[in-house]
Amino acid sequence: MKQALSKLFLKESSKWHFWLFLSFLAKGLIFIFLISRHGVSPLHGFSGTIAGDTYTYFEPIENLISHGTYSPDFRMPGYGVLYLPLAFFFSKSVAFTMLIVLQYIVAASTIYPLSLIARYLFKSTQVFYLTFYLYLVSTYTSLFDATLLTESFTTSFLILSVFFLVKAFETEKRHSLNLIISGLFITWVVFLRPVFMPLVLLYLTVVITFFYLHELKKSTLAKSFLFLLPFIIFEGTWISRNYITHRKFIPATATIYYPGYEDSYYPPLLTLARSWGGSDQYWDPDAEIRWFGLNDGLQPQLHNIPVAIPNYVYTSKFNYDSLLILKKQLGSYISLENIHSTDTIKMSALLTGIRVRCHSYAASIKNEKPFLYYIKAPLMRTKHFLLHSGTYNLFTTLTSQLNSLCYGIKVFYSLLYIAILTLGTFGIILLTRKNLLSTPVVIITAIVCYTILVHPILLGKCEKRYFVPAYPFILICAADLLSKIKKIFIS
């Protein structure tokens, strides 16, 4: 029986048709489940998920088609360029459907390349098998294949960028074309999620180090240029376009907020919540920012779940009563905003008071409680970012309302997420100690570490989906550790 199963499921890694068949089958079943779980869609004829950010990626493309102008332009066009030909020829619902189908196809196609990355880095067929099957059954990234957000393509293109990079490092296959393709995919990742732009420098460092150690310096410079060529072309075009439009040097986007948000109450309130390590995900029932009355995107039955502000956050500048006043001001402003009040003087005074209070209270935490602001708060934000069920949007109903089968599935995938996160973290620590300067192993550990560093720690963003692109790479580290453990106990 064991030999039969091994013969069936542990075929040679070169049998690409077998591995792709399994990938499309498993991903297809998950994809069908995701698009079948919804009731009435906000867009007739579309069965995927439309999120709050969805239309901000496509509105500039629709304006480009209708008026010849890419606006508003606070999003880079990495997602929109995929929507452009679909929107030009089809209705919105059909274009959206075709886009999520494309997300599924690309995502399914990357399971095998991810496993080949693992095999190349660790020279182990066992790590190949572990990576393939762990990623095959994981839903943490698959959940976004049916969602109109950038996570699916960002994850897939990040995998492909690493795959073609390590392919260029293989002794028999150091093809210049692979470097160009790798550069193209990491450039596309940047245009999907500008926060990953520093990864271009990471890749370049790995390219220079690897080829400098294996070839002549002259060849190293040539290889580096080939890798950078796509980024130079497309980023240069984007910068030129922005300069012509805005008369400013804008390498990514002019703002990280929606147009108009930067001058609203929203950024200062986020700054205040983040200053003590509170979660800024107002659509999550346990997010501290909900204490101020923000419940947008939260299921109505969860609105009354109590949220508390920890007592240790108070300073000489504010206390609980001060926050109550701030909460009251915010409620008054939102009420006037919801009814489209014409009392602009009152609204302006309320908004100014809210913004001043938020900035003042956050600054007092920074000045009076530096340990909380610089150490504890980033750790708390990282906790919000990483430590969760990993299945927060697997089902559309509350956990307490799931039947036994669905509850069991949710528990299984939550345990799988926690296991991958735990094993992967230890795997990264061991790899970092052993291969700190080794290339290209450093690239997968650095992607995970950078994703964690930049989102909850540097930018203060706790949104769980931002970790999705790094998940495949922490999974490889978990697979490597599992392989090492097996060798110790099962020799």
Image (cartoon, grey):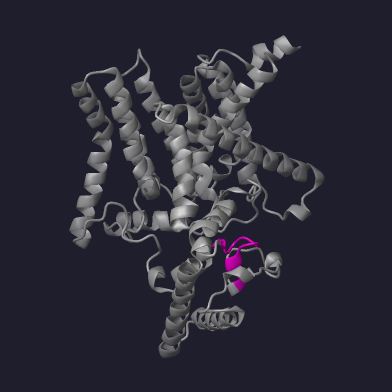
Q: Is residue 308 visible?
A: yes
- Give the image quarter of residue 56: bottom left
- Left or right: where does residue 164 sit relative to residue 365? left
- Residue at 20% over, 56% down: 243
313 inside magenta stretch: no
Q: Position of residue 290 (x, y in %)?
A: 60, 68
Please tell me which residue lies in front, 122 or 58: 122
Q: Position of residue 340 (x, y in %)?
A: 48, 82
Quadrant position of the N terminus in the picture: top right
Above or below, 379 relative to 152:
below
- Left or right: where does residue 351 sit relative to residue 255? right
Please tell me which residue lies in front, 251 or 319: 319
Quadrant position of the C terminus in the picture: top right
- Residue at 18% over, 61% down: 247
- Residue at 63% over, 32% down: 137
- Residue at 54% over, 79% down: 318
Secondary structure mostly seen in magenta is: loop
Above or below, 213 relative to 48:
above
Q: Position of residue 463 (x, y in %)?
A: 53, 54
Q: Is residue 293 visible?
A: no
Q: Position of residue 110 (x, y in %)?
A: 49, 30
The magenta stretch spans which residues?
278-291
